Amino acid sequence: MGNSFNKPPPPVVLVPPLFDFPPLAARTRMLESSYDLLFGKLALKCLFEDYFEEAKNFRTRIMLKPLDDPTVDMVATVSGPLDKAEGVVGNALFRWQGMVKLLILGLMLPHMSSDIDDPHTFVDLFVSNSEPVLRTRLCAFYPTYGFGSFVILPLLLKRRRALEDLFVMGLRHSSENLSVGATFNPFSTIDKLPANAWLVNKIGRLTVGVQYEPQCETKDYTRFKNLRNWSCAIGYGVGSGSPLSPSFTFGLELAKSSQFIASFYQHVVVQRQVKNPLEENEVVGITNYIDFGFELQSRVEDAETSNSIPDSTFQVAASWQANKNFLLKGKAGPLSSSIVLAFKSWWKPSFTFCVSATRDRTVGKTSLGFGLHVENIREASYQRADPNFVMLTPSKEHLAEGIQWKSGKRPMLQSDINSENFGSLPRELRPYGNIL
């Protein structure tokens, strides 16, 4: 047995963590309509928006969690123009999750999860120098039964408005194949009808959904007959949701009976050879993550519709994470195009600096935007000094115990990833949720 460890170590492939996984928007998805997040919409939103700072602007975001109390965290953001002090926006979000169900109900129900890592049950408090000045949100979800509820309450506003008209309460049922829910303004003196309602069903790789979101001014039940208040979508998706597995999503949507939207998103995992003098000799490759997305929007109404909807527009974007430190992104549309280079240092906490260049073709000028992110919320950023894992191909998996004996940690097996057996993977490389 001892001689086996004297043999040359097997070749391994490095598997770096993603820059932002799971996405921060996934932490509050139980407050949102499933219709607005599925069909590839959440992935496309992250691809089109993350690290693309506004031209001639800066943004600083600090996301911190105390190590001795993992149930709380704080996210503070300051953004504004580079050339003047006016227009600077600052806000902070304090969040507490985990045992919030005890606070809500005052007792522990059977089968009620108390996992502090459950992002679907939380209370947060938001403060800002813009609207709303002060707001609180409370969300509880019970995965055993699939039922959830949430409340959104602005506590302080700059403008004089009745707070009871802005009080929002939502109820939902979500499982792996079905999501149905609605939001209301229960104390509103203006409108007693649902402010939003949705139904999404997943059948194999096919997902279909419909959403009611009133836009017209009528305050009676005739609004349900107005097709402009309804949207429907259908999507086809392949993939497990883990960043180590390739995925593909294609969607078609008719939004408010006035706009047709076609989109697709693809996540590709590739391994390339690497010769890095800083790594050990058995490291022969590294895993890269490549994402590509496209969205086309076309107006389908007649000339009587609002001119606020353009006849047709599109945007296309791609990103390439070469290793744990560098990310390159680019996107283009009919009026402008942008490119981003981001560098991340995996210290405790981690630091990410990004610079984006935006070319406005309407005026023929190129402007820069800058961003700085400091974080220790997501696991990969603070629980290990070297955020690299290793993965073995099927022909080398019998040597896993030897590597574990030498390095103290078991390498990932490619066969486990292919069979969607993610139990042995680090938490930040597993799918972040299969509930609709």
Image (cartoon, grey):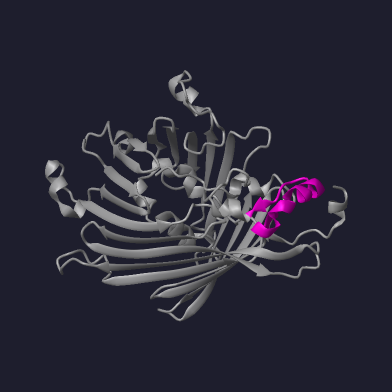
226 displayed left or right of 282: left
Percent coordinates x, y for residue 214 in the rendering = 22, 48
**Residue 13 appears in view:** yes
Q: Quadrant of residue 313?
A: bottom left
Residue drawn at point x = 69 percent, y = 66 percent: 285
Is residue 320 located in the magenta-colored stretch of the structure?
no
Percent coordinates x, y for residue 105 in the rendering = 43, 21
Q: Quadrant of residue 253?
A: bottom left
Residue lying farthest top? 107
> In this view of the protein, which residue sits in the foreground, 350 or 424?
424
Percent coordinates x, y for residue 433 in the rendering = 48, 44
81 up-or-down from 37: above or below = below
Q: How many marks?
A: 0
> In this view of the protein, which residue sits in the foreground, 294 or 329?
294
Residue drawn at point x = 25 percent, y = 34 percent: 188
153 displayed left or right of 277: left
Give the quadrant of the C terminus: top left
122 displayed left or right of 398: left
**Residue 377 appears in view:** no
Is residue 406 located in the magenta-colored stretch of the structure?
yes
Residue lying farthest bottom? 364
Q: Quadrant of residue 167?
A: top left
Magenta region: which residues? 386-413
> In this view of the protein, which residue sits in the foreground, 304 or 135?
304
33 up-or-down from 116: above or below = below
Residue drawn at point x = 60 percent, y = 54 percent: 415
Residue drawn at point x = 75 percent, y = 70 percent: 275
45 up-or-down from 173: above or below = below
> In this view of the protein, which residue sits in the foreground, 54 or 314?
314
Percent coordinates x, y for residue 191 in the rendering = 21, 38
